[in-house]
Image: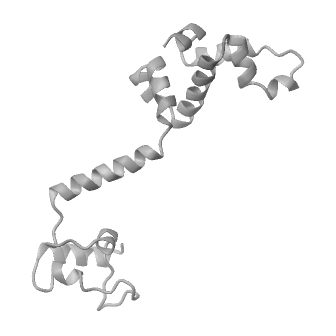
Amino acid sequence: MHHAAFTHEIDRIGNPSPHGLNRAREFDVSRPHTGLNPPLPEARRTRRLPRGRISVTEVKEEIGRLQSSWRETSIPEPRESQCRAVLGEEALAALDPFDRVQLGYVIEICRQSRSLSEAGRTLFAVTRQKRAQANDADRLRKYLARHGLDWHRVVAS
């Protein structure tokens, strides 16, 4: 929103009158911006309020809707809960989202595998074929150690 339009909104809201908040509902947002047709904030364009004011209840509902939509774009819950169970809340909070996804997948594979070696073979299936000597269990052991974990802690949690 441009500074002048923002100032207009503040002036209008701060001084409700017959030409104030109620008039905002009369603007035709399909027309381009002119001096007679100032642009409305996004929230006003998408929803018309019956009383012209936003209540605390409506704000709380909007916050809940936004938080819900944010959760939908986060890490799949089973993997994040696996990370939380193994690492704890504090250590999980210290990880970047990328690392959470990767570690969550590693934990999932470890729990599906019968041994450290089997999990390593699954996780490093492509790169192991390019190596002269594949030591997938050692690679996995080192990866887990970087996160302060070991095989027994991952599969026991």
Is residue 121 shown above or below 31? Answer: above
Question: Is residue 54 something that shows in the picture?
Answer: yes
* Residue 84: percent from left, percent from top: 44, 23
Q: Is residue 104 left or right of residue 35?
A: right
Q: Is residue 138 left or right of residue 51?
A: right
Kindly identify the residue that appears in the image at 45 percent across and 46 percent down. Answer: 72
Q: How many marks?
A: 0
Q: Is residue 90 left or right of residue 118?
A: left
Direction right: furthest residue:
132
Quadrant of the rendering where the N terminus is positioned: bottom left
Question: Is residue 149 something that shows in the picture?
Answer: no
Say which quarter of the image contains residue 149. Answer: top right
Kindly identify the residue that appears in the image at 32 percent across and 87 percent down. Answer: 28
Direction top: furthest residue:
152
* Residue 130: percent from left, percent from top: 87, 26
* Residue 148: percent from left, percent from top: 53, 14
Name the one closer to the observer, 97 or 4: 97
Say which quarter of the image contains residue 99. Answer: top right
* Residue 22: percent from left, percent from top: 16, 81
Say which quarter of the image contains residue 102. Answer: top right
Question: Which color scheme does this rendered protein use?
Answer: one colour
Is residue 56 shown above or below 111? Answer: below
Is residue 12 shown above or below 56? Answer: below
Kindly identify the residue that appears in the image at 31 percent across and 84 percent down. Answer: 38
Name the one closer to the observer, 89 or 80: 80
